[in-house]
Image (spheres, rainbow, N blue to C red):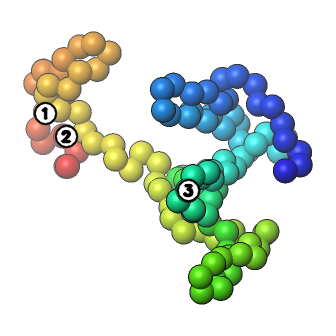
């Protein structure tokens, strides 16, 4: 691989079995904007790339094309990355509920808007 750049901490960090990557201001031309993930194991898998799409407000996951020769695969097309999934930002957000803990405080009925003003779940 060429053009390998050491990233400043804390853009890349690890805790236990999880690697954390932060793309800092990825719209700035000189900053990285794609995370390339691959697997090194006895179980082969092609890699994926993840990048943020600001126009659609979510994450794009792409995979590279390869050639299937029946019992093996080869011939990756170096620039042929196609979108295979899109993950909307904040796609799993839900309204606050009684009993939720926020900053160490447990929400009660009085902390929430009246029932008729609450978002539908």
Numbered badge on residue 59: none
Percent position of residue 54, x then y: 61, 52
Numbered disc 3: secondary structure: loop
Q: Is residue 50 visible?
A: no
- In the orientation shown, which residue stands out farthest toward the top? 104
Left or right: 11 with respect to 6?
A: left
Image vertical order of residue 26 relative to residue 87, above or below: above
Q: Are marks 1 and 2 in contact (CB under 8 Å)?
A: yes
Image vertical order of residue 99 relative to residue 59, above or below: above
Left or right: 83 with respect to 26?
A: left
Left or right: 109 with respect to 57?
A: left
Quarter of the rendering containing residue 68:
bottom right
- In the orientation shown, which residue stands out farthest toward the right? 2
Percent position of residue 25, x then y: 70, 36
From the image, tell me which residue sits under label 3. 42
Q: Pick the residue in front: 111 or 18.
A: 18
- The Cα–Cα distance between marks 3 and 2, rounded to whole angstroms, is 51 Å
Image vertical order of residue 45 relative to residue 29, above or below: below
> Which residue does the image show at 11% across and 38% down from the upper left?
115
Numbered disc 1: secondary structure: loop
From the image, tell me which residue sits under label 2. 118
- In the orientation shown, which residue stands out farthest toward the bottom? 70
Q: Residues within 10 Å of mark 2 (few under 14, many from 20)?
A: few
- The Cα–Cα distance between marks 1 and 2, rounded to whole angstroms, is 7 Å
Percent position of residue 120, x then y: 19, 49
- Mark nearer the N terminus (3 vs 2): 3
Numbered disc 2: secondary structure: loop
From the image, tell me which residue sits under label 1. 114
Image vertical order of residue 118 relative to residue 78, above or below: above
Which dot, 3 or 2, sits closer to the camera? Answer: 3
């Amino acid at each position: 691989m060429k053009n390998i750049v050491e990233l400043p901490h804390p853009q890349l960090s690890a805790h236990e079995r999880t690697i954390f990557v932060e793309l800092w201001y990825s719209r700035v031309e000189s900053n990285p904007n794609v995370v390339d993930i691959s697997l090194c194991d006895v179980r082969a898998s092609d890699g994926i790339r993840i990048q943020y799409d600001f126009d659609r407000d979510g994450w794009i996951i792409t995979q590279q094309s390869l050639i299937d020769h029946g019992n093996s695969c080869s011939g990756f097309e170096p620039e042929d990355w196609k979108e295979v999934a899109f993950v909307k930002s904040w796609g799993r957000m839900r309204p606050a509920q009684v009993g939720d803990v926020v900053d160490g405080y447990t929400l009660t009925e009085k902390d929430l808007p009246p029932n008729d003003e609450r978002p539908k779940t």
